[in-house]
Structures are given as structure tokens and as C-alpha cells.
Amino acid sequence: MLLRLGKWLVVLALVVSTGAHWLALQSVAWATMAVRFSQTDTVAVALEKTFNGQNPCDLCKAVAEGQKNERKEAVLKLDVKLELLLQASPIVVLRPPAAVQTPTPVPTFFARTEAPPTPPPRLA
């Protein structure tokens, strides 16, 4: 149940963030206007009155006002974001470190100077 609620909240957040809620409200307004106009006129005339823009209903006006306010807020927010992005940062180029040459170690061998015992020792 909680997982399903979370999914619906994510969907709702995406719808609102993309502005699709205005599209849904405008669709409801157009459908309502088409039904209202078709009660007194033919369907063709009702659809023409609905979509010509000369007879907006209260919901159409509210949607237009909401979209206009949302655009103003988006422009203001965008200006603030651009100011933050215009800050220049210095570019630092570093040279690779010089190759360090280490002396090659000389192998040290201990040479025996005495000869082996003659005859070789035996275990008793």
C-alpha cells in the first residue's frame, strides 16, 4: 500500500513539474464549453465557439492566468541560476613530475675464500 502511494506521489510530482496539470485543466474547460455550447447550437458551431478564443470561460481565464504567473516565476528563477553559473573558476595545469632515477642496486655476493674441507665431513 505504501509503495503504491509512493508511486502515485512521484507521478503527481512529475505531472506538476512538467506543467501537465494546466493541460488537464484546459482540457476539462474545453470539454465543458463544448457541451455547454452544443446545447444551444450545432456541434460544429459549438466546437468553433469553444476553440476560437473569443468566448473563454472562467476556468480558461484561470488557466491562462496560472500559466502566465508560472512563466514569470520560471524566468525569475532562471535568472538566479544563471548568475551562479557565470562564476569563472581558474584552470590549473600541472606538469607531470620529473622522472626520478634511482640507482640500480648492486648485487652483493659473499665469495668464499677458503676451500671446502677434504674429505667432506660425514654424518656418524
Image (cartoon, rainbow, N blue to C red):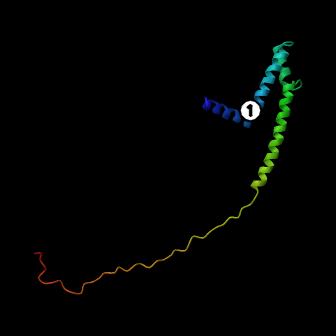
User: Seen in the image, is 12 located left or right of residue 63?
Assistant: left
- Residue drawn 46% across the image and 77% down it: 102
Q: Secondary structure at mark 1?
A: helix
The residue most toward the right is: 54
Placement of the C terminus among the 4 image quadrants: bottom left
Q: Vertically, is 84 above or below 93?
A: above
- Quarter of image, res 74: top right
On the image, the x and y values in percent for residue 103 come to 44, 79
Report the residue at 66% width, 35% height from top.
Answer: 10
User: For the point 78% across and 27% down, which residue is it?
Assistant: 25
Q: How many marks?
A: 1
Q: In x, y percent, where is residue 15?
A: 71, 33
* Left or right of 93 in this view: 107: left
Vertical side of 98 occupied by 63: above or below? above
Q: Quadrant of residue 61?
A: top right
Q: Front-most of 113 and 30? A: 113
Question: Which residue is farthest left?
Answer: 124
> Is 122 on the left or on the right of 114, as rendered?
left
User: Residue 123 in the image: x percent, y percent?
Assistant: 12, 75
Of residue 124 and residue 105, the one placed in the foreground of this image is: 124
Residue behind mark 1: 20
**Quadrant location, the N terminus:** top right
In this view, 4 is above or below 77: above
In the rendered image of this protein, does residue 39 appear above or below residue 50?
above
Residue at 66 percent across and 66 percent down: it is: 92
What is the x, y in percent for residue 73? 82, 42
Q: Residues within 10 Å of mark 1 (few under 14, many from 20)?
A: few
Query: Label 1 amino acid?
Result: Ala
Where residue 63 sits, quadrant-wise, is top right
Q: Residue furthest front?
A: 124
Q: Is residue 108 left or right of residue 94?
A: left
